[in-house]
Image (spheres, rainbow, N blue to C red):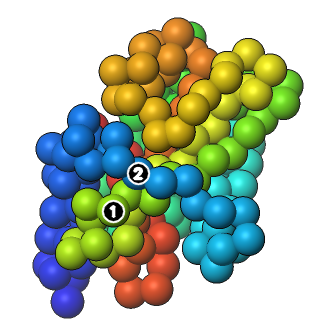
Amino acid sequence: MKPIKSLLGLLIFCLMILLQSNAFGNGEMVAVNSPLYNELMPVAVKWKNAVLNKNIKVLVDCVLPEDREYIIPKLKDKNSKLYNFLFKDKTSIYEILRKSKNLKIVLVKHEGLEQAGQGVTIYFYDEERVKLTFPVNSNEEQKLYNQGKIVSKFFFKTEGQWFTSYEF
């Protein structure tokens, strides 16, 4: 069962990368009153709080169980690329979230991923600094991230639980 879950996670991640410019551009915002929103928003808030509190345990819980052994050392090593990406770089996820005065969280469901499972990108940004129209063009998204203005994190659902990947 573990190889199947790993393969599913890898497949979804690969689809995310391959389809980013096409399928993600066709994503649709998840309505605030939808069951998906009610299910995933607490996951988004929990993940955001884990980054802001540098809570490695919660960040690890968001990864597929079979990937945790590999990810834990990277999250604990303050010199790893992953640690820098999450916490130390000038445009780290931590810095972007920390500097947001009016944090907006938007969920965008991706229609092109139904065959591989549910996939949602969660956007975090300061509503006062950035005005976005969804779906966001992948080039614009990358530009805003490079400027330290937006965080986007892809989550996928498998066996009733939402997970993300920290590999790039």
> How busy is the neighbourhood of tag 1: few (under 14 within 10 Å), some, or many (20 plus)?
some
Q: Residue furthest right?
A: 101
Sequence-first disc among 1 and 2: 2
Check disc 1 and give the amino acid type. Answer: Glu
Which residue is at 41% across, 51% downward? 27
Q: According to the image, label 2 marks what residue?
A: 27
The number of numbered discs placed on residues in the rendered structure image is 2
Give me the residue at 52% from left, 66% from top.
61
User: Which of the 4 quarters of the picture holds residue 13?
Assistant: bottom left
SS of the residue at dot 2? loop
Q: Nearer the viewer, residue 133 or 156?
A: 133
Q: Image point 23% across, 41% down: which residue?
A: 22
**Which residue is located at x 65 percent, y 63 percent?**
31
Q: Is residue 24 above or below residue 41?
A: above
The residues tagged by marks 1 and 2 sit, at their Cα atoms, a distance apart of 6 Å
Q: Is residue 116 above or below residue 4?
A: above
Residue 58 location (% of width, % of height): 61, 60
Residue 139 lies, in percent from the top left, at 34, 21
| Residue 69 % position (x, y) | 33, 62
Q: Are marks 1 and 2 in contact (CB under 8 Å)?
A: yes
Residue nearer the viewer, 120 or 42: 120
- Residue 128 x, y percent position in the rendering: 80, 20
Evaluate whether residue 57 shows in this view.
Answer: no
Q: Secondary structure at mark 1?
A: helix
Quadrant location of the N terminus in the rendered image: bottom left
For disc 1, the marked residue is 111
- Neighbor class of circle 2 (other Cα within 10 Å; few <14, some 14-19, many 20+) is many
In the image, residue 127 above or below residue 148: below
Can residue 16 be seen here? The reply is: yes
Q: Amino acid at mark 2?
A: Gly
Image position of 109 with respect to 91: above or below: below
